[in-house]
Amino acid sequence: MDEQDRVPRQFMVSAFYPAEAREGAVGARLVDIFEPAVTEALEYLTDDLESETKEELLRKLRSIELQSARSSPPEHSAAPYPVLIYYPAGGCNRFANADVCEALASHGYVVLAMDGPHDASLVVFPDGQLCKGPLQGDYISPGVGDVGYLLGQLDELNGEGILSRMIDTKRVGIFGHSRGGYIANISAFLNEQVKAAVSIDSFLWGYMSEGTGLEKHPLDFQAKVRSMSKPLLRLCGRPDGTDPQKEAEFCLKRDGGDFIGDFSVVAFPGWSHSDFMTTPWSCGKGYDLVANQSRVRADAAETLTDILTTFFDSRLRGADTDQLHGCIRRHPALGVATQAAMK
């Protein structure tokens, strides 16, 4: 065991949950994820910008508010609620899809959004410690381990604190974007507690790639994963796509050829990889932050929320599993293909 292995690992989680309506409640700030070291965190994130650009961006970041309010009283009338774990893309923080997490909470889910140390561009811990990233090398195994640990803490979270009696530990789903989508896939396979997973514009099971951590999941492991029967949905961006239905069927055949489980693909023709980040203003560093100002599709949050809610409702709440096709009809620019329909 080397010195790094002896250092206790810690990560940050934010919980989005159904809350009582409070008149005059003040929305949370986007930079709240950097408390108690907001100033130091923003200085680090913007230290490679020219002073004028930096000051303008800092004003923007400090002014952005979310719809949710911090520490709002939980709404227990329909509790316990299914729980969803969200893992963001590499170099992004747990608020990269905050508006989607908020919307899922308003639909009756408890969403636990994670930040991995040396995976997010910056993680600030309660003692003010700054953990800078992203890490080069094995960025998969630590995230999978963090998810497994969080799953093991659900009973404790449900037993005391603000989430007391809020979580249905038997109805658990996971979703992630990019490398977070791969972590979601692997976590669903390794943890029986996870009942359904969504991989957002991510590689499905990974390829042998030295230095990335994917070599920890070789071909024999991938073959086992493909035998997983629990529901898996893949959202696939296709920047150059034209016919959404043909794109969906192409992705299904390419990625799910010998997959025997409940596997579906939704194709997003015209969507780039970054379009799936709906609240990206503090993801990355410096010039990435500036570029992110123009990277939000007006329809992204609503579309993703509709699809995620439909999928998890059908797999965790017993809703009609065919509703995914109905959902896509509400978004005619997209296409959907399911493994069952192709056989």
Image (cartoon, rainbow, N blue to C red):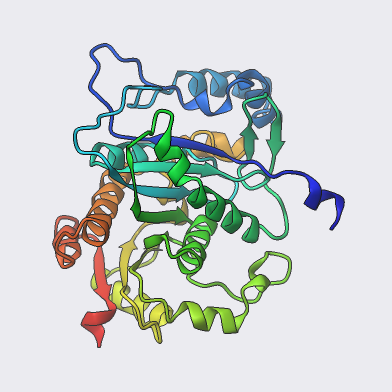
Locate the N terminus and report the quarter of the image it occupies: bottom right
**Image height check: is 200 above or below 128?**
below
Number of labels in the image equals 0
Which residue is rendered at x = 61% and y = 20% of the image? Answer: 36
The answer, for residue 245, to whether it is visible in the render is: yes
Residue lying at the far right of the rendered structure: 2
Residue 96 to residue 309: above or below: above
Question: Image point 24% across, 24% down: which residue?
Answer: 20
Q: Is residue 279 visible?
A: no
Image location (x, y in percent) of residue 311: 26, 59
Q: Nearer the viewer, residue 134 or 238?
A: 134
How far from the left and from the top, in percent, is residue 241? Answer: 34, 68
Name which quarter of the figure residue 175 lies in. Answer: bottom left
Residue 227 on image: x %, y %: 43, 81
Give the residue drawn at x 26%, y 74%: 337
Where on the picture, by quarter, is residue 196?
A: bottom left
Q: Can you say which quadrant of the picture contains the C terminus?
A: bottom left
Q: Along the horizontal axis of the image, is 285 left or right of 171? A: right
**Which residue: 23% across, 13% down?**
23
Q: Residue furthest front?
A: 159
The residue furthest top is: 24
